[in-house]
Amino acid sequence: MRKTGVAIAAVLFVLSFAAAGFAAEPAGKSPAKAEPPSWKTSSLVEETATVQAIDQSTRMVTLKGPKGNAVTFKASEEVRNLAQVKVGDEVKFAYYRSLAVRVLKKGEAFPAAGESAAMARAKPGEMPAGVVGTETSVNATITAIDKKAKTVTLKGEDGKSVTVTPLRPEKLDEVKAGDRLVISYTEAIAVSVEKAEKKK
């Protein structure tokens, strides 16, 4: 897992306070006692394109989108079973991203931070398909909040600090100096190809 610094933490923290483009998911609350605040936002975009042309010798593929726009690209060697793809087949794309911020409880230690990636591909003989995803986790401590200037200063585990302005500064009322944050960002892209005769 590759380590990440306070600059990444700052970017993710700013994004976590901006609901635009994400669907907010309210954090759960315990009736027994007040829990530290947390936020999670996510979005899922799905699109379908049609194979308009394909050259198996050069691995050049042309896809036509739902609005008639076309794009031509060379399929890398990582794309298995390209020979299975024919003109008219449908290519489905799904792009998912989520962003979560959690304030640690008093005495709770920072978890391991860094960046990890995962990939899966279709088995030989199957229609081409695959998914690739990355997860970035960053730890930071709020060292200062200036509500008049609408800024917050974050200090990473490397000791470096950065001051940022959240896109939704009113959310600063939910945190305070000294709060320790775990910020996680997940991004995944899935692609699959379906035979034209499966269209209904």
Image: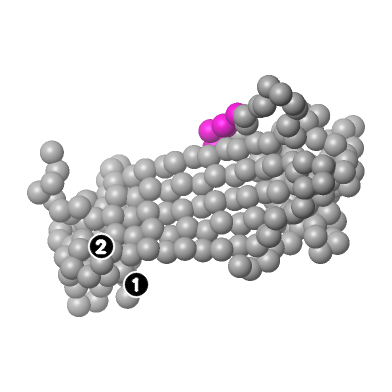
Residue found 74% across the figure and 57% down from its top: 7
Which quadrant is the N terminus positioned in? Answer: bottom right
Q: Is residue 21 left or right of residue 50?
A: right
- Label 1, on which residue? 78
Quarter of image, res 73: bottom left
Residue found 33% across the figure and 64% down from its top: 121
Residue found 68% across the figure and 36% down from its top: 38
Q: Is residue 184 visible?
A: yes
> Residue 174: x, y in percent?
78, 31
23 inside magenta stretch: yes
Amino acid on which disc 2 is placed: Pro
Outermost residue on the left side: it is 197
Camera-side residue of 89 and 29: 29
72 inside magenta stretch: no
The mark tally for this picture is: 2
> Residue 45: x, y in percent?
42, 42
- Label 2, on which residue? 128
> Residue 118: x, y in percent?
47, 63
Residue found 80% across the figure and 57% down from its top: 156
Q: Is residue 11 left or right of residue 72?
A: right
Q: Is residue 107 above or below residue 193?
A: above
Bin the neighbour count of mark 2 within 10 Å (Cα to Cα): few under 14, some 14-19, many 20 and up: many
Bin the neighbour count of mark 1 within 10 Å (Cα to Cα): few under 14, some 14-19, many 20 and up: few
Q: Secondary structure at mark 2?
A: loop
Amino acid on which disc 1 is placed: Glu
Which quadrant is the C terminus positioned in? Answer: top left
Q: Is residue 14 visible?
A: no
Quarter of image, res 167: top right
Q: Which residues are magenta?
A: 21-26
Q: Is residue 187 left or right of residue 35?
A: left
The Cα–Cα distance between marks 2 and 1, rounded to whole angstroms, is: 10 Å
> Residue 97: x, y in percent?
51, 47
